[in-house]
């Protein structure tokens, strides 16, 4: 289930497509000219053989794309063909002849042609309704109607507020997990609960990224806020997985993110699905299973402790509890750790524990 008020995320390819027609681009400026003039248009962004094989008639232009050129050429009835990078106008006033056996749900000739060309070629096709002044994007099986910038900004700001609340909940869950780790009281349910909250945060981030792509130059402030709210989130998720994943359940950062967002789009309340990310299967009883973290996440919070040294510590001691109980001499024997760094590890973990206890009481 998606967070309240959020929409189903689009794939990465279509997010890049939205950036192609975002405010601030020459193509979007030309589209806006056409909308205001109510002339309508059919534009294909792509000049490969799969597109050119559908072209009949018209004339070759082969000139740099300028908004005014696009507007003037759209006054003719035929379609306009742009290069793949949308920087040049190649053909104008052409007739597109896609395979008529391709099913289409559209009723108007222009939009029906646009849908079929997009399905047949996989390229971006833009249809502008003359009567309704609406810009519709088709690419493969995707269809998307561009919306008013003011409306999108409102939605983006609402999503940022939602993300801020979910990030606060995630931070609280991570702090609670840290306290349980120091007390050696972690269960699988606790670790999965953090993944649950992280999945919601990542899902909302994807929605905001789509808004930013559509906003173009108008989305700069939203992008800055998003970067601030998402700082270190993915790092924390990956470290939680490294701390608790069963041997053989290793996943890359992109795989973990994809699975969390996938479950967010379906039903992230099912903890058993999330437990599979860590390599655990079984009935609900498995969620009560005690776990001992390897210690990657907390060790990475110690200032100026290199990643390789963290890896060496975990490799030597196996889990966080053994690291906490280790003496200075035992720490000193780990590769990359001298006496000074051994003291820094002990002092860093002590300070982290005190900080976590203070956060628990707050």
Image (cartoon, helix red, strand yellow):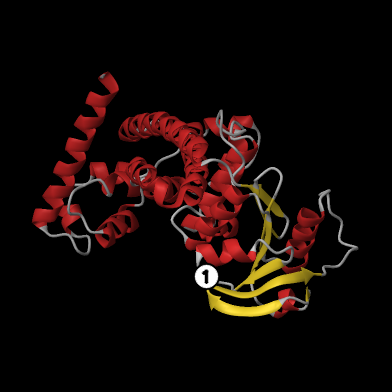
Residue 110 in view here: yes
Residue for point 10% across, 56% down: 339
Of residues 186 and 272, the one drawn nearer to the viewer in this rendering: 272
Q: Callout 1: helix, strand or loop?
A: loop
Position of 113 with respect to 173 (left or right) is: right
Between residues 213 and 136, which one lies in front from this camera angle? 136
Image coordinates of residue 169 in percent, x first then y, are 40, 29
The x, y position of residue 323, in whole percent, is 27, 46
Q: Give left or right: position of 321 versus 102.
A: left
Residue at figure coordinates x 62%, y 30% from the top left: 284
Question: Visible in this render: residue 250?
Answer: no
Considering depth in this image, is 39 or 18 the residue closer to the camera?
A: 39
Point out residue 212 in the picture as x, y percentages from the top left corner.
Answer: 46, 47
**Which residue is tagged 1?**
65
Residue with the most extreme right position: 101
**Residue located 32% across and 43% down the image:** 228
User: Which residue occupies the foreground of this view, 234 or 193?
Assistant: 234
Relative to 209, say whether 248 is above or below: below
**Quadrant containing the N terminus in the rendered view:** top right
The quadrant where residue 7 appears: top right
- Location of the C terminus by quadrant is top left
15 vs 9: above or below: below
Position of residue 16 measured from the top left corner of the image (x, y, whole percent): 53, 59
Image: 127 above or below 156: below
């Amino acid at each position: 289930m998606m967070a309240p008020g959020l929409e189903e995320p689009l794939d990465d390819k279509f997010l890049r497509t939205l950036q192609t027609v975002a405010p601030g681009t020459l193509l979007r400026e030309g589209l806006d000219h056409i909308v205001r003039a109510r002339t309508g248009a059919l534009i294909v962004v792509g000049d490969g053989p799969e597109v050119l094989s559908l072209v009949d008639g018209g004339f070759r232009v082969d000139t740099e794309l300028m908004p005014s050129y696009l507007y003037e050429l759209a006054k003719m009835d035929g379609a306009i063909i742009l290069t793949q990078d949308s920087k040049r106008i190649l053909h104008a006033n052409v007739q597109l002849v896609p395979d008529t056996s391709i099913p289409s749900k559209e009723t108007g000739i222009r939009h029906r042609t646009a849908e079929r060309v997009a399905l047949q070629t996989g390229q971006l096709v833009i249809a502008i309704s003359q009567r309704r002044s609406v810009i519709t994007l088709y690419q493969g099986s995707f269809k998307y109607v561009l919306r008013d910038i003011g409306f999108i900004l409102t939605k983006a700001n609402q999503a940022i507020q939602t993300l801020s609340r979910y990030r606060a909940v995630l931070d609280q869950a991570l702090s609670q997990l840290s306290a349980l780790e120091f007390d050696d009281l972690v269960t699988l349910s606790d670790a999965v609960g953090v993944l649950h909250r992280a999945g919601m945060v990542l899902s909302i981030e994807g929605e905001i990224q789509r808004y930013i792509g559509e906003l173009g130059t108008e989305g700069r402030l939203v992008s800055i806020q998003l970067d601030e709210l998402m700082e270190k989130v993915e790092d924390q998720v990956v470290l939680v997985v490294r701390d608790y994943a069963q041997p053989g359940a290793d996943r890359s950062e992109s795989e973990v993110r994809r699975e969390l967002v996938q479950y967010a789009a379906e039903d992230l309340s099912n903890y058993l699905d999330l437990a599979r990310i860590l390599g655990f299967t079984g009935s609900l009883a498995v969620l009560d299973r005690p776990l001992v973290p390897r210690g990657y996440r907390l060790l990475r919070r110690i200032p100026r402790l290199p990643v390789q040294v963290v890896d060496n510590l975990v490799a030597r001691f196996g889990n966080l509890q053994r690291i906490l109980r280790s003496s200075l001499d035992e720490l000193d024997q780990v590769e990359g750790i001298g006496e000074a760094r051994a003291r820094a590890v002990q002092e860093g973990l002590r300070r982290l524990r005190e900080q976590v206890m203070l956060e628990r009481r707050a």
